[in-house]
Image (tube, rainbow, N blue to C red):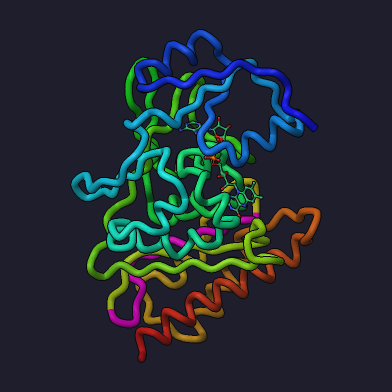
Amino acid sequence: MKAPAFDYVKPHSLAEVFPLLQQYGDEARLLAGGQTLLATLNMRLSEPSVLVDLSAITELRGLTLAGAMLRIGAMVTHSEIEASALVAQHAPLLPLAAPHIAHRAIRNLGTLGGSIAYADPAAEWPTCLLALDGVVVAKSATGERRIRADDFFVDLYTTTLLPGEIIVACEFPVASANHWCDFDELARRHGDYAIVGLAGAGQRSENTLAQVRLVFLGLGATPLRALQAEGVVKSQPLTASLINQAVAALKNELSAVGDLTSDAATKMHLAGVLLKRMLMKQMQSKNA
Ligand SMILES: Cc1cc2nc3c(=O)[nH]c(=O)nc-3n(C[C@H](O)[C@H](O)[C@H](O)COP(=O)(O)OP(=O)(O)OC[C@H]3O[C@@H](n4cnc5c(N)ncnc54)[C@H](O)[C@@H]3O)c2cc1C
């Protein structure tokens, strides 16, 4: 199918974007890498009357250290994140997750902001943002808002971004000396959206995860934190028995939503496998 007819504008600054959003309202769509939007237009799942191309806005680009936060512009691509030495040093979870996003051609065009705004529950960046306790920086004609990831993803493809707001950047707390993180996912083929994935991050002291955030993708309508499992392992020396308790807690607290390829029971089983693997890896690496 072909996309419906639409107008196209390419502003060169954020100041030019906001009047367009006010003028067109719901009829406007922001175009970032186009890796999701163009497919939905071609399938006629969405029929905006104007696309506002963000690619010429330099304010949406760049990776910088801002105090204790690593700031990544909304138009930074998946590939740029994957290759950045600054990201590897200060938010090492992101380059662990990046290779799991689709294929190179898509990673070269797809952007952080587009992925966070689209809020696919099987996407890697929303899950990492939540695991790292990151922040979405949104701007509108009336000012800037900083939204914690915990408050941003509210339902399937639904966020707390308001009409007229645009994501300008995401900020990630800079990894401390005792930072730990890991990412793993299970997909039918490399490059497919994952069936289930897990991002873990926090702080580690000896054989103990002093801080821990465990976030699953692909289980529900949003990325999901496993709060009970986090509670089981937090501040306790990691042992095989503790890890089994964490897996039991996970199965008690979260329930998966099945999809066309995997039923809910399969997803929960795989989530347990991923959690056990990740925690065993932490236990073994600390004891080595
Ligand atoms: C074959 C295929 C496989 C894929 N597999 C994966 C995968 O395994 N994992 C994964 O995470 N993703 C996957 N994707 C999606 C890909 O990562 C996209 O790049 C991403 O979802 C959207 O980013 P984009 O920059 O292309 O956004 P676009 O497609 O341009 O926009 C997506 C949505 O976000 C809105 N938007 C864009 N930028 C902003 C902004 N700054 N502020 C507010 N709203 C904004 C747009 O209006 C639109 O509604 C896949 C895509 C394809 C085509």
Where residue 277 sits: x, y (%)?
54, 78
Quadrant of the rendered structure where residue 179 is? bottom left
Q: Is residue 217 above or below residue 6?
A: below
Q: Is residue 48 left or right of residue 112?
A: right
Q: Is residue 9 above or below residue 37?
A: above
Is residue 179 located in the magenta-colored stretch of the structure?
no
Which residue sits at x=50%, y=75%? 278
Where residue 256 sits: x, y (%)?
69, 57
Instruction: Give the magenta-colored segment's residue range.
Output: 206-219
- Magenta segment, prevailing SS (helix, strand or loop): strand
Q: In the rendered view of the protein, which quadrant contains the C terminus?
A: bottom left
Q: Name the quadrant where ligand 1 sits.
A: top right
Q: In the rendered view of the protein, which quadrant contains the N terminus?
A: top right
Number of numbered discs overlaid on the protein picture: 0
Q: Is residue 83 above or below residue 142?
A: below
Is residue 214 located in the magenta-colored stretch of the structure?
yes
Looking at the image, which is closer to me, 158 or 139? 139
Which residue sits at x=53%, y=43%? 115
Looking at the image, which is closer to me, 100 or 272? 100
Looking at the image, which is closer to me, 1 or 235? 1
Which residue sits at x=24%, y=63%? 176
Q: Residue furthest top?
A: 23
Which residue sits at x=57%, y=24%? 29
Q: Is residue 14 left or right of residue 121?
A: left
Q: Residue furthest bottom?
A: 288
Where residue 250 sits: x, y (%)?
58, 66
Q: Is residue 45 above or below residue 76?
A: above
